[in-house]
Image: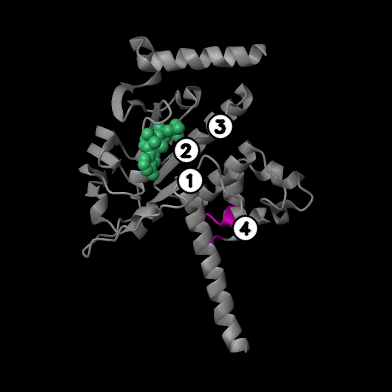
């Protein structure tokens, strides 16, 4: 009986971890019910660990052939740099992140990591190289420790501590009566949006990926939280190749390049100051957000 119990118990644990990993990623990409299988090429290469550059090379993509979503997207995120993607709702920002994770294959052009077409890489090695800080982090009904360690289940206590410290969670954890052992999730302590995001950052830091996709929350934030998020994005991105999907322009002012998407096309690109000086689509979005913020402060 015991002999049977141990493997079953182990399988149960493995299943739980696998299920949860899938849940987080699928939710991040809004793909709960449409996960599509993509197989590795028979001679697929393993992407070695280390710094990684990302290149979108004339990428075209449609979920449905009748309705193209991305058109001739061409840009690079050099290793260690941060590129922000901004644009109105529906312009294709999340689609671009899904393609980098290879949830779907592009229909024209290519996406390359360190020069390798994603279709030539094993998905395991690609996924190991990418960390995701989702818009809305899923917290499991388990302890805070489990929820952070989930970024790399084999991580030691010291490593979890270091990631929590880097994500500025230490003080918060110390103030909780049960510290790391506090149960969180739907049946436990409810964390604020900012706290959840810090858990997501700690998870991502624990995984220590070369590439980070940061999907910023859409909800309106007060300017203090916004500043904190900007600092957190910069902290998590430092030393990594980062693609930040931004809704609040002020959080990506320092990005190495800002790409403005409109209906799946790049309509402007450059640094914050240069884009403002152009007085085009970006400057208009910026002014609109400043106005909205002013109105909120006045309320
Ligand atoms: P938001 O800022 O609102 O998150 P976004 O810029 O990230 O928007 P995407 O989610 O990339 O936009 O969507 C781009 C377009 O693709 C939209 O018109 C959307 O309706 C469509 N789309 C997104 N996901 C799918 C899907 N799974 N199947 C078909 N069409 C989709």
Query: If you read the primary sequence from the N terminus, does the residue marked by circle 1 or circle 3 appear first?
Result: 1
State yes or no: residue 151 in magenta: yes
Residue depth check, mark 3 versus mark 2: number of the one nearer the observer: 2
In the rendered view of the protein, which quadrant contains the N terminus?
bottom right
Query: If you read the primary sequence from the N terminus, does the residue marked by circle 3 or circle 2 appear first?
Result: 2
Secondary structure state at the residue bearing disc 2: strand
187 or 47: nearer the viewer: 187
In the rendered view of the protein, which quadrant contains the C terminus?
top right
**Gap between marks 2 and 4 measured at Cα:** 22 Å
In the image, which disc is placed on residue 8? none
Q: Residue at x 52, y 39 (%)?
A: 135
In the image, which disc is placed on residue 28? 1
Instruction: Identify the image quadrant of residue 80.
Output: top left
Instruction: Identify the image quadrant of residue 245.
Output: top left
Q: Which residues are magenta?
A: 148-155
Residue depth check, mark 4 versus mark 1: number of the one nearer the observer: 1
In the image, which disc is placed on residue 229? 3
According to the picture, the residue beneath numbered tag 2 turns out to be: 215
Query: If you read the primary sequence from the N terminus, does the residue marked by circle 2 or circle 4 appear first?
Result: 4
Count numbered badges in the picture.
4
57 or 220: nearer the viewer: 220
According to the picture, the residue beneath numbered tag 4 turns out to be: 146
- Is there a contact, CB below 8 Å, between mark 2 and mark 1? yes
272 or 70: nearer the viewer: 70
Which quadrant of the frame does ligand 1 lie within?
A: top left
- Residue 167, position as x, y percentages in the image: 58, 42
**Gap between marks 1 and 3 measured at Cα:** 18 Å
Q: Residue at x 64, y 40 (%)?
A: 195
Q: Residues within 10 Å of mark 4 (few under 14, many from 20)?
A: many
Residue depth check, mark 2 versus mark 1: number of the one nearer the observer: 1
Q: Is residue 295 above or below residue 33?
A: above
Secondary structure state at the residue bearing disc 1: helix
């Amino acid at each position: 009986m015991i002999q049977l119990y141990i493997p079953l118990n182990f399988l149960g644990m493995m299943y739980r971890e696998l299920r949860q990993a899938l849940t987080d990623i699928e939710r991040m990409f809004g793909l709960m019910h449409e996960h599509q299988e993509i197989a590795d090429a028979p001679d697929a290469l393993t992407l070695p660990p280390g710094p990684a550059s990302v290149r979108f090379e004339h990428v075209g993509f449609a979920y449905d052939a009748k309705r193209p979503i991305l058109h001739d997207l061409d840009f690079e995120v050099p290793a260690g740099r941060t590129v922000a993607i901004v644009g109105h709702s529906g312009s294709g920002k999340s689609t671009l992140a899904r393609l980098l994770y290879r949830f779907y294959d592009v229909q024209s052009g290519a996406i390359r990591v360190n020069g390798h077409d994603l279709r030539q890489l094993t998905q395991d090695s690609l996924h190991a190289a990418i960390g995701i800080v989702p818009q809305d982090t899923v917290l499991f009904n388990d302890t805070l420790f489990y929820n952070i360690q989930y970024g790399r289940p084999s991580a030691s206590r010291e490593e979890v501590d270091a990631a929590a410290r880097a994500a500025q969670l230490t003080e918060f954890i110390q103030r909780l009566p049960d510290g790391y052992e506090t149960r969180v999730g739907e049946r436990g302590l409810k964390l604020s949006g900012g706290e959840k995001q810090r858990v997501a950052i700690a998870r991502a830091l624990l995984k220590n990926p070369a590439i980070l996709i940061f999907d910023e929350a859409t909800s309106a934030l007060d300017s203090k939280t916004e500043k904190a998020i900007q600092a957190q994005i910069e902290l998590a991105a430092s030393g990594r190749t980062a693609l930040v999907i931004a809704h609040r322009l002020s959080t990506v002012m320092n990005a190495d390049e800002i790409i403005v998407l409109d209906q799946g096309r790049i309509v402007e690109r450059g640094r914050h100051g240069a884009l403002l000086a152009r007085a085009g689509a970006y400057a208009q979005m910026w002014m609109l957000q400043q106005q909205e913020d002013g109105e909120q402060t006045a309320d």
